[in-house]
Image: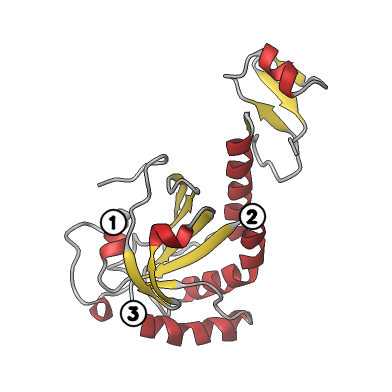
Amino acid sequence: MSLHIGDETPNFTAETTEGTIDFHDWIGDGWAILFSHPKDFTPVCTTELGYMAGLKPEFEKRNTKVIGLSVDTVENHVAWSKDIEDVHGHPVNYPIIDGSSLEVAKAYDMLHPNASGEAKDRTAVDNSTVRSVFIIGPDKKIKAMLTYPMSTGRNFDEVLRLLDSIRLTAAHKVATPVNWKDGENVIILPAVTNEEAEEKFPDGWDSPKPYIRIVPQPK
């Protein structure tokens, strides 16, 4: 089953490096980032997990939990974590899901439903599609999805920027323009009438075209 933005994220119970979790319970009433990897002890993924460990405090400021998935066992994850800390200087400070059954990867449409075999016998190439990022809201619905090839490390600063945009636009009737960063001007949604906009933005707006209404970012 293919997943789309707006779908409820598949729930699951799984072992992680921080114990057993029910995913929806673990998310709680905040936001979550689920990011996945095809195999432990792979070079690009090692750099990613280390960078995310350093960035985790920024996600915590935004009431957002971080969790990883790799198609290997918890025991392998723990051993891999030592390499990650050696490379990046940051211990892995978030749970990594035991993906050795392939069930979570299949539930999130990252592996073919018929994929099978022991995790230890599967290569990174076998699991190559397991390389995605999901931003999940407090309502447990998918707000954004990103998928990368194995050869390209993900930009987690961009994931943070995307999260800022999604959280802002969920709270206010605005959209964010190209290359927007937190604190910069935003755009009033087309669905908002000028009368409504005048109430919400009494200082007015810039309008280079009739359908573009630019205002400072709401607090």
Image quarter (top left, top right, bottom left or bottom right) of the C terminus = top right
As drawn, 26 above or below 98: above
Residue topped by disc 3: 73
Residue at coordinates 43% horizontally, 78% vertically from top-left? 17
Dot 1 crowding, Cα within 10 Å, few <14, some 14–19, many 20+: some
Report which quarter residue 209 is drawn in: top right
Q: CA distance from mark 2 to mark 1?
A: 27 Å
Q: Secondary structure at mark 3?
A: loop
The residue mark sitting in front, 2 or 1, is 2
- The answer to whether residue 20 is left or right of residue 111 is right
- Amino acid tagged 3: Thr
Residue 214 visible, this orientation: yes
Percent from the top left, x then y, of residue 159?
57, 54
Percent from the top left, x then y, of residue 67?
48, 66
Which labelled disc corresponds to residue 62? 2
Which labelled disc corresponds to residue 107? 1
Q: Secondary structure at mark 1?
A: helix
- Amino acid tagged 1: Ala
As drawn, 147 above or below 66: above
First in sequence: mark 1 or mark 3?
3
Report which quarter residue 185 is drawn in: top right
Percent from the top left, x then y, of residue 151?
45, 64
- Amino acid tagged 2: Arg
- The answer to whether residue 47 is left or right of residue 4 is right
Q: Secondary structure at mark 2?
A: loop
Report which quarter residue 5 is drawn in: top left
The residue mark sitting in front, 2 or 3, is 2
